[in-house]
Image (cartoon, rainbow, N blue to C red):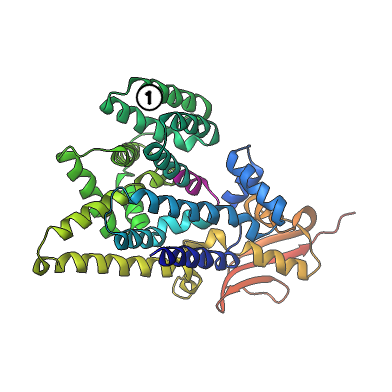
């Protein structure tokens, strides 16, 4: 089984690495690199410094965090799933989740938070509590996304009647709010259903429905543990916030993903206590869920083919992570290494060595208009970006 485990992890890492060439840096990723200082910025810039200024160095840290997260999840699942074969199935489900795939290759806080949560749970369950205190203190300075962890641990420590742990996490919660703040502005705008839809997309509908069922079922039978508190508190808090504002679910989804061992534990128990003749429905539910995950992950990995069926290229879910690299290469092939264009594209092009200047003006035009002296970017013989490049005479 050990060889199968490393085969799954290796294949996953290889597949993600092969996807690097399919993506360009997005504006949000460029903002992380060039914006206010953060641990994630330091982490990514260290990789760029060591491996060079390229896409591989940009995304390698996220893939590394993903691989470590998968290993930690497998280790944590040993306390919840008795059969080793089922732990491997859980691992496969984890790496196929659309939200996990995104966090594994896109530079944002989600991958960092997911790794941090899994590391905390592993340390809490296997080592002295003093290491958990130290880890939480580090998290408070690393990223504001860990504020939901402190919130969950406040509730958990109250339930467990751990006074010192409660005081510590309450202090970390207040300090985190003081340093990073939290946006609770706005009036009710009906984003609750939107948030539910995003969660369903992150997990796939069947798994998300079963996830909610498992968390609620454990509440009814009072079967609480650390994973339940972290996942449930974060899910409920994000849904409550969604009644009044649009919620950045990349900060909350990692907490909900943490419930996967609970889901697998409940499914395994429900399956084993039934006679063979009554297990058919569970087998079909698992097979259908796995097939849907494979379809979803295939759509993510081969997303450029979707341009053939999407009328407006900008409506493609990955459009914001396309075009820039190919556009920079095309400009450089024409001897143009600096342009004046819109802020977002300028920030992205700068990563690929096309800086800002007033010598050339780059203006995006409709993809239906293809000019002989213009610039066009195509994927699978489908034009997705068109622009005019005009030389500006500076007297």
Query: What number of labels is visible?
Result: 1
Against 44, is 24 above or below? Answer: below
Residue 148 among magenta residues: no
Q: Nearer the viewer, residue 128 or 252?
A: 128
Q: The magenta stretch spans which residues?
A: 107-114
Secondary structure mostly seen in magenta is helix
Residue of label 1 = 165
Residue at coordinates 47% horizontally, 42% vertically from top-left?
116
Residue 117, horizontal then vertical, whole percent: 43, 42
Residue extending furthest bottom? Answer: 381
Q: Nearer the viewer, residue 300 or 116?
A: 116
Residue at coordinates 54% horizontally, 58% vertically from top-left?
320
> In the rendered image, which quarter contains the N terminus?
bottom left
Residue at coordinates 37% horizontally, 24% vertically from top-left?
165
Q: Nearer the viewer, residue 97 or 77?
A: 77
Residue 85 seen: yes
Determine which quarter of the picture holds residue 383. bottom right
Residue 26 seen: no
Residue 215, horizontal then vertical, whole percent: 23, 45
Q: Secondary structure at mark 1?
A: helix
Residue 112 among magenta residues: yes
Residue 45, horizontal then vertical, whole percent: 67, 47
């Amino acid at each position: 089984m050990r060889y199968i485990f490393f085969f799954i992890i290796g294949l996953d890492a290889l597949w993600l690495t092969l996807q690097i060439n399919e993506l360009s840096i997005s504006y949000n990723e460029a903002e992380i690199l060039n914006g206010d200082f953060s641990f994630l910025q330091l982490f990514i810039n260290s990789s760029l410094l060591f491996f060079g200024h390229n896409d591989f160095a940009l995304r390698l840290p996220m893939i590394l965090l993903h691989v470590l997260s998968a290993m930690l999840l497998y280790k944590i699942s040993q306390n919840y799933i008795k059969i080793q074969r089922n732990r491997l199935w859980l691992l496969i489900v984890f790496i196929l989740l659309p939200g996990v795939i995104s966090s594994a290759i896109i530079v944002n806080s989600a991958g960092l938070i997911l790794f941090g949560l899994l590391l905390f749970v592993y340390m809490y369950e296997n080592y002295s509590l003093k290491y958990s205190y130290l880890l939480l203190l580090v998290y408070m300075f690393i990223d504001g996304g860990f504020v939901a962890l402190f919130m969950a641990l406040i509730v958990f420590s109250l339930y467990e009647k751990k006074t010192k742990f409660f005081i510590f996490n309450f202090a970390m919660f207040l300090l985190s709010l003081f340093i990073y703040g939290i946006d609770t502005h706005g009036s009710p705008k009906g984003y609750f259903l939107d948030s539910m839809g995003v969660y369903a997309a992150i997990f796939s509908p069947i798994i998300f429905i079963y996830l909610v069922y498992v968390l609620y079922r454990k509440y009814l039978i009072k079967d609480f543990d650390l994973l339940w508190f972290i996942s449930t508190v974060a899910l409920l808090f994000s849904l409550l916030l969604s009644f009044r504002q649009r919620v950045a679910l990349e900060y909350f989804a990692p907490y909900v993903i943490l419930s996967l061992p609970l889901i697998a534990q409940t499914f395994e128990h429900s399956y084993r206590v039934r006679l063979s003749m009554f297990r058919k429905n569970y087998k079909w539910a698992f097979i259908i869920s796995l097939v849907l995950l494979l379809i979803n992950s295939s759509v993510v990995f081969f997303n450029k083919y979707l341009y053939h069926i999407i009328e407006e290229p900008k409506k493609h879910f990955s459009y914001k992570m396309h075009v820039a690299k190919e556009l920079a290469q095309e400009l450089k092939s024409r001897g143009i290494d600096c342009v004046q264009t819109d802020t977002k594209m300028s920030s992205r092009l700068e990563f690929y060595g096309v800086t800002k200047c007033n010598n050339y003006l780059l203006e995006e035009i409709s993809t239906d208009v293809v000019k002989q002296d213009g610039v066009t970017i195509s994927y699978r013989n489908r034009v997705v970006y068109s622009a005019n490049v005009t030389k500006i005479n500076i007297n």
